Amino acid sequence: MAEHDRHGHDTGSVGGGGDPKLQGLTFGQRFKRRMIKNRLAMVAFAVIVLVVGISILAPLLTEYTPEEQNLLRRLDPPSGDHLLGTDQLGRDILTRIAYGGRVSLMIGVLGASGGMVIGVTLGILAGYVGGTFDHLVMRVVDVMMSFPGILLAILIVSVLGPGLNNLIIALIVWMVPTFARISRGNVLSVKEMDYVEAARSLGASSPSIIVRHVLLNILSPIIVYMTLSVATSILTAAGMGFLGLGVQPPIPEWGAMTSVGRQYLRDAPHVIIFPGMTIFATVLSINIVGDVLRDVLDPRMKT
């Protein structure tokens, strides 16, 4: 049975989209063509690859460790020995940014993916089952969405206590409502499609219908929002770290580094500028690539 998108368009296995030039191409080929035609997206993708590569290869790229102190070199400006300078304890800022990337990227991915798994599961079940269960889930979602996201995260961390694990839990809880709403709204459209009714008439079980015909046809908006949620999680984790509610010292984390650096903004601006620019460049690049991903996955978009 051919796959359809949430508006009933036949997308097949690869989906050509509104542009005939993209029909018959695989997802990877379409993504590559979109990226090549968008120079800003190419730069953004290169930034993401660079940040991920530096974070993974941190031990090979620097001779220092993130906790290594040298009080004789505290607040040194960028130099040959320390390319991005040192902080208030004489620690190499480039090293801490590289190792901090591991923490920040992990927080972003785990926070967004955890919220996606729980939210999509609840949203699909609520939309497909309907009735009392749907009403109950959506009312809980409404209550959660009535709180501003950052305040909800602060509330959770305040109750559980600051730290890496509790911060990830707070981000997961924050992400659940939006994923639930997105998936439920799309399920309500998809479950009334002819191919779903045909699957029911052929005796397919509800779990099989949900996985093979419902979930697969609502993945596009979920994947796009998942990508953007990674950026949101990184930015929120940085904000929580700036407030002292995120990852605790001596673990390097971009938000915590900017929080410390603001105290030396006048005398040693490099302490806050480089971590801040890293957050800015990473979040902006993820959002730009997420927009390209949306264009590729939406079969109605034109080149």
Image (cartoon, rainbow, N blue to C red):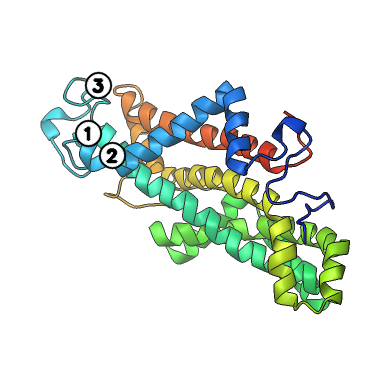
The residue at 23%/30% (across/down) is 86
Residue position for label 2: 96
Q: CA distance from mark 2 to mark 1?
A: 6 Å
Query: Quick check: 268 above or below 141?
Result: above
**Horizontal side, residue 235 vs residue 62: left or right:** right
Task: Note whether residue 261 is visible.
Answer: yes
Residue position for label 3: 78
Circles 1 and 3: CB atoms closer than 8 Å: no
Query: Quick check: 35 above or below 294?
Result: above
Provide residue 227's location: percent of width, then percent of height: 57, 45
Tag shown at residue 177: none
Residue position for label 1: 92
Circles 2 and 1: CB atoms closer than 8 Å: yes
Q: CA distance from mark 2 to mark 3?
A: 14 Å
- Is tag 2's residue or tag 3's residue first in the polypeptide sequence? 3
Query: Quick check: 133 above or below 269?
Result: below
